[in-house]
Image (cartoon, helix red, strand yellow):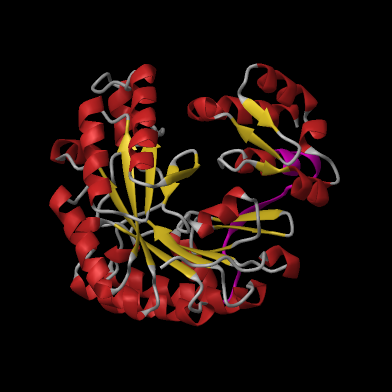
């Protein structure tokens, strides 16, 4: 069912959103640069113990019950059923019936037992990395699941009672055509998800796919074809009654991802686990991407090694704008002015004047938004805002 939004947590000075990073994978996808590794059973056990310990430490920073909990990775469902249940059981007291409680899952790791563990812990939303419904495309990405397993995972989760389902798809894949992309879109939409994310493949340095690109073994999809893929996603999701609310995200009414909205609105959140980030009182703190260092520090009663930066002044304003302009609803001018003491168009006159003249930015007395036809190239606008800051 749809979940209603609580009162903004920033009014209390506490975080209403919690992210838990589970850096565990059965195997590394060829495009992935997120921190994840294979772990032994003992490493997994000690990791879960450390997460539970860190949760006790950060509990005073959380506005309970939380508006959203998001367990990502890695592949949280790569943990065995007992450890997954122990991890989620530590999170359950932080939630109530209105909390959006999401767990990411690879379809190849979802079975009836895991689905029952999720439902029993109060998880009401699952994000499935389907990526494609074509076996050859999945193999090129290094995915461990099949299209049939994606369909089966959806059915198993729904039977268990996890009814709010999100699917991830990727376009601009090596060897992908507009036709195979549209077919994957249609197969995903046939499963009637509440939410769909459509991302363009990015060749990240250090990944096997980036090495293939440098060696000439694969080529990037032509930008015009990528635009056609993006437009197809916008068209087919609209026909399926999913509303685009962010550059790459589409949802049925009432099912926009509340956790990700916290990020895009630059609101407070707490991150637990190696490589997880927190944003509180204008300070962003990111844990080191090292599971051994994380476990050792937390279980010894020390803070996890981390980098931190304080966002202040025009840089904080620019980042808030950059994030909010990813949303189709754009920037609430009055709310921005109340937060920073300045209207965004007055704070960044050069960038807004330029892109308004090009038709890329739309200004009304209430809001500033990116014009729909410019969503595909929005990163250029956002980069200029940051440069003007």
Q: Nearer the viewer, residue 289 or 192?
A: 192
Give the percent coordinates (x, y) of residue 9.
67, 66
Magenta-colored stretch includes residue 307:
yes
Q: Nearer the viewer, residue 239 or 35?
A: 239
Q: Is residue 387 above or below residue 100?
A: above
Give the percent coordinates (x, y) of residue 172.
32, 29
Instruction: Assign the C terminus to one quadrant of the image.
Output: top right
In-image side of 194 versus 131 (left or right): right
Quadrant housing residue 184? top left
Report the residue that reaches farthest toward the right: 341
Q: Is residue 114 visible?
A: no
Q: Is residue 376 above or below residue 340?
A: above
Q: Is residue 345 visible?
A: yes
Residue at (28, 31) in percent of width and height:
173
Residue at (23, 64) in percent of width and height:
110
Magenta-colored stretch includes residue 38:
no
Residue at (63, 50) in percent of width and height:
265
Q: Nearer the viewer, residue 229 or 59?
A: 229
In-image side of 210 versus 16 (left or right): left
Give the percent coordinates (x, y) of residue 35.
42, 51
Over which residues does the magenta segment extend?
A: 301-318
Q: Is residue 201 above or below residue 299?
A: above
Quadrant housing residue 162? bottom left
């Amino acid at each position: 069912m749809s979940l209603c939004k609580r009162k903004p947590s920033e009014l209390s000075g506490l975080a209403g959103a919690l992210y838990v990073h589970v850096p565990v994978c059965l195997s590394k996808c060829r495009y992935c640069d997120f921190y994840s590794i294979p772990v032994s059973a003992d490493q997994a056990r000690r990791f879960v113990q450390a997460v539970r310990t860190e949760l006790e430490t950060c509990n005073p920073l959380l506005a309970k019950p939380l508006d959203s909990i998001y367990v990502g990775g890695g592949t949280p469902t790569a943990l065995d059923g007992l450890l997954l249940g122990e991890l989620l059981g530590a999170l359950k007291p932080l939630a109530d019936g209105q909390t959006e409680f999401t767990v990411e899952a690879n379809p190849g790791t979802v079975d009836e037992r895991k689905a029952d563990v999720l439902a029993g812990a109060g998880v009401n939303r699952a994000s499935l990395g389907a990526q494609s419904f074509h076996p050859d495309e999945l193999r090129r990405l290094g995915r461990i699941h099949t299209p049939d397993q994606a369909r089966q995972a959806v059915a198993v989760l729904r039977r268990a009672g996890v009814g709010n389902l999100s699917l991830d798809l990727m376009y601009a894949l090596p060897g992908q055509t507009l036709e195979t992309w549209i077919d994957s879109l249609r197969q995903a939409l046939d499963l009637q998800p509440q939410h769909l994310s459509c991302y363009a493949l990015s060749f990240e340095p250090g990944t096997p796919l980036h090495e293939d690109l440098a060696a000439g073994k694969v080529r990037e999809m032509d930008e015009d074809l990528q635009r056609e893929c993006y437009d197809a996603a916008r068209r087919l999701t609209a026909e399926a009654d999913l509303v685009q609310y962010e550059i790459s995200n589409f949802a049925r009414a009432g099912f926009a991802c509340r956790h990700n909205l916290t990020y895009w609105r630059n609101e407070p959140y707490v991150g637990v686990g190696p490589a997880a980030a927190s944003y509180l009182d204008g300070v962003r703190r990111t844990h080191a991407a090292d599971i051994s260092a994380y476990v050792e520090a937390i279980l010894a009663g020390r803070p996890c090694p981390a980098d931190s930066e304080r966002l202040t002044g025009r840089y904080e304003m620019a980042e808030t704008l950059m994030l909010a302009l990813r949303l189709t609803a754009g920037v609430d001018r009055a709310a921005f002015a109340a937060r920073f003491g300045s209207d965004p168009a007055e704070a960044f006159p050069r960038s807004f004047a330029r892109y308004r003249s090009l038709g890329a930015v739309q200004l009304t007395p209430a809001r500033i938004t990116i014009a729909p036809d410019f969503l595909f190239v929005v990163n250029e606008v956002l980069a200029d805002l940051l440069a003007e800051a």
